[in-house]
Amino acid sequence: MLYFSAVLLNSFSILAQCKLIPYWKNIAAFEKPLFLTKAPGLTGQLFVVEQRGLIYRLDESPETKTRKIFLNLNEMVSQEGSETGLLGMAFHPRFAETKKFYVSYTTGQKKELVSHIVEMQVSDLVSMRVDESKAKELISVSQPFQNHNGGSLLFGSDGYLYFSWGDGGSGGDPLNNGQNINSLLGKIHRIDVDKSESGLPYAIPHDNPFRGKQGIRPEIFAYGLRNVWGMAFDKQSGKLWAGDVGQNATEEIDVIESGKNYGWRYYEASAVFKPEDPKPENAVPPVWEYSQKDGDKSVTGGFVYHGPSQSWDGGYVFGDFITGRIWMFHPDRKENKLLLDEQSPAVQPSCFSDVLDGRILVVDYTSGKVLELVSSGK
Ligand SMILES: [Ca+2]
C-alpha cells in the first residue's frame, strides 16, 4: 500500500495542473490564519480565524478593501507552541435565529494547557457585536503535552456539533489516549448544543454510539485518531471526511463513521505502529494514505468538491502542510491526482474551504493569504 501510493504520487507529479491565485486582491495578509468559514443566513460575508485569537469578518467580494475584527481572544488564548491558540470556529446552523457560534481554542501552556469548546453569541445580526456576557464553556480537556490539540469543529446536517481533539501529544501517543474510550483525547466528538442534560451545558445525541455505556465517554463519535486537522461533510453523500496527521511514516484520510475505531496507536494509517499493544480487531483503515518519504509530513484535510469542474466533481481536495502539495482523491476510482506540486516560496495550506460554491479556497498559513486553486489554463 505504501509503495503503491508513492508510485502513484511520482507518476502524477508531471500532471500537476493547477495554480494558486490570491482571492482578495486588496486585503492585507492575515497572521497565521487557520480557518475560513461563513455564517448560515448571513449572505456575502466570510470569517477568517487567526491562531493568535482574532477572527475577521469581511465581504466575500474579491474586490473588498476592508476587514473588521469580529472577535478578539488574543489575551485569552495560548500564544506559545505551534499547535495552540484559536484553532477553529463554527456558526450555529440556525445562526440567523440563535445568533450563536462556537470556538475551539487552548489556554495556558505546558502542564496547564487546556482545550476548550465555547459557545458565544452576537447581540444582533446588523452590528454583529459579540456579547461577551453570553459566553458559555461547553466542554474542556487538559492537554498532557503541548502538541496534538486538534481543534476542528463543524456542524453536521443532523444539527449536532462535531469536534476533534488530538491524542494529547508528545510522540507515539505515550498515554495511549487514542484507544482509551474513557478519554476525550484522540477522538472526534458529537454533542447537541441545543439541549442540556445531567447538569451538562449540552446533551448527548440519542444515537451517539456510546451513549449509556458504562466507562465510555458518551460524547465520543469516533476514536483511534492521532490528530485530526480538517474535517468536512460531503454536501451530497453526507459522509464525514477527515485528515489525520501521521507519526513518522504515513499521513491518512479517513471517512468517519459513528462508533468506529481508526486504529491509532496500534496502527499508523494501515501499517502496524505499536505491535506490542493488543491488536484492535475492529480498526478501520484510511480511505487514502500517503508516505512521508518525499518530505510530506502533515496532512490538512479538505473537502469533497461539487461544482462546475467535471474533472474535479466528487473528488476530495486536500494537502500537506509541510510541502504544500495539493492533491485530489477520487474515491470512486481510488485515484489520487497531484493538483499542485511544491511551490517556491512554500505554501502551507492550513484549511481548504468550500464556503464559495464550486470553488476551492486555500488558506495559506505562511503568507497569510486566502488563495484560490484554479486550473493553470485560467
Ligand atoms: Ca488511523
Image (cartoon, rainbow, N blue to C red):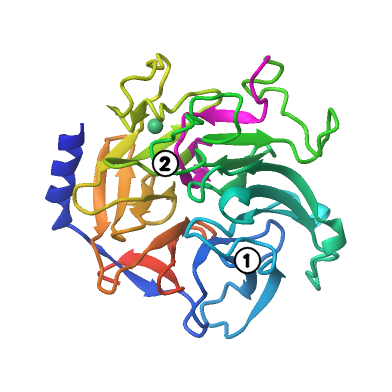
Judging depth in this view, the residue of 355 and 295 nearest the camera is 295
Which quadrant holds residue 188?
top right
Horizontal and vertical percent position of residue 265? 40, 29
Q: Which of the labelled discs sits on residue 244, or is there none?
A: 2
Query: For this view, does 140 lie left or right of residue 353?
Result: right
Q: Judge whether residue 264 can be spotted in this image.
A: yes
Which residue has dot 1 on it? 53
What's the CA distance linking mark 1 and mark 2? 24 Å
The region drawn magenta spans 214-240
Where's residue 368, x and y in %? 46, 73
Give above or below for 152 relative to 34. Answer: above
- Foreground residue, 171 or 71? 171
Q: Quadrant of the C terminus?
A: bottom left
Residue drawn at 46 percent across, 42 percent down: 227
Q: Nearer the viewer, residue 367 or 51?
A: 51
* Front one among 227 and 64: 227
Ligand 1 found in image quarter: top left
**Type of amino acid under label 1:** Gly
Say whether residue 162 is left or right of residue 166.
Answer: right
Characterize the local packing of mark 2: few (<14), some (14-19) or many (20 or more) Cα atoms within 10 angstroms. Answer: many
Residue at position x 33%, y 19% in the image:
276
